[in-house]
Amino acid sequence: MLKRITAIGFISLLILLLAAAPATAHNGALIVGDNITDAMKADYNDYIIKEGTTLSILLIHGHGFEYDFGNISESVNVTIVSPDGTKKNVATQTVSEEIDLILSDEKGTVTYQKINYNFTQSGTYFLYATLPGETIELVKLAIFVGEGTWDDWNKNLGLPLEFTLYTRMSGLAEGETVYGKLVYANGTGAENVKYYVEPVKTAEESKALQEMLVSDYATGESIYLIYSKRAMTDEDGRFVSTISEQGVWTFVASAEADGTSYKATYTFPVLPQFYGTESIPAEAENETPGFGMVLAVLAIIGVGAFMFMRRK
């Protein structure tokens, strides 16, 4: 009996310790939104903006697809790289917010970091920040402003571990493929590194998804099989990934460089599919004005020429 009680006590203590331990599987991310609730509802219109727009940008830690977040309690600097190459460090402000905890079906308080910034130049802005820890997290975000986003969207910032995209992300639509490379600071590709890509979801979407998984799948961890799509870079650090849904997504990868563990993230918007033949109205299928008339005239000319040749 004593052994049994001791075993139960040990297991209970272990559970408490695990519950108190930081959620190391969580990811840092820079994401657009005035608060977490707002950020989880954001779409491509919040990342592709007009010149002179002021955005609120959050530095969060968690999994957006299951509405599960940890705390970032200390201010950090967010470095903003403007289209003309100038850099500016902006200190974050600490914010706490009460949210629904989907996994426990309770309410809780989450602490995160926030900046506000006015994007005045046309072109692609890059933002990044560093979260210290046993694994140093390097979070990266692109904001596309005005008409100048045709250039520099594939810029490498020289971070210790970094996602560099070869696909212009300001025009990426659902169902399309992303080509990119995971690189170290010296430009060398991160060879055979596992990475994954995951979306953000609202509280309502996350709860419905969680309930569906619990009822239809053998394990609640199936949510990771569905929404943490994992793959591996090749020997040059290159990767290819198809993004299945519109919304906001984040690439995540972990690797060591010079004996230090790093985790890199890159957050990006995905547009709805905006082309294809299925949605084209029947009356719009023929876009050439008077095309039918042109065919009729050509037919008449052809018949006339044929009759003329026969008379000869």
Image (tube, rainbow, N blue to C red):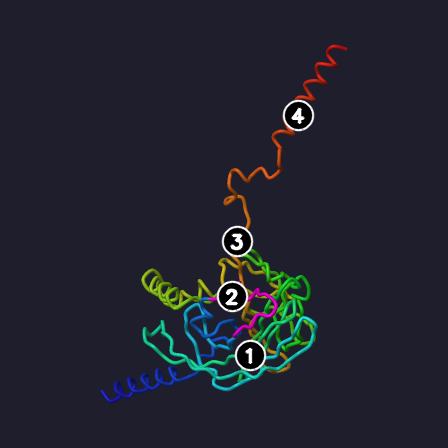
59 vs 52, nearest the viewer: 52
Q: Which residue is mark 3?
A: 273
Q: Secondary structure at mark 4?
A: helix
Type of the residue with mark 3 = Gln
Closer to viewer: mark 1 or mark 2? 2
Q: Amino acid at mark 1?
A: Glu
Work out which quarter of the rendered image holds the C terminus and state it: top right
Q: Marks 4/3: CA distance?
A: 39 Å
Mark 1 and mark 2: span between their CA atoms? 17 Å
Image quadrant in which you'd find residue 216: bottom left
Q: Which residue is mark 1?
A: 137
Q: Which residue is mark 2?
A: 249
Q: Dot 1 surroundings within 10 Å: few (below 14), some, or many (20 or more)?
A: many
Element at label 2: strand
The relative height of residue 275 versus residue 195 in the rendered view (above or below) is: above
Whole-Å distance between the Cαs marked 4 and 1?
A: 68 Å
Magenta run includes residue 2: no
x and y percentages locating residue 262 in the rendered image: 57, 78
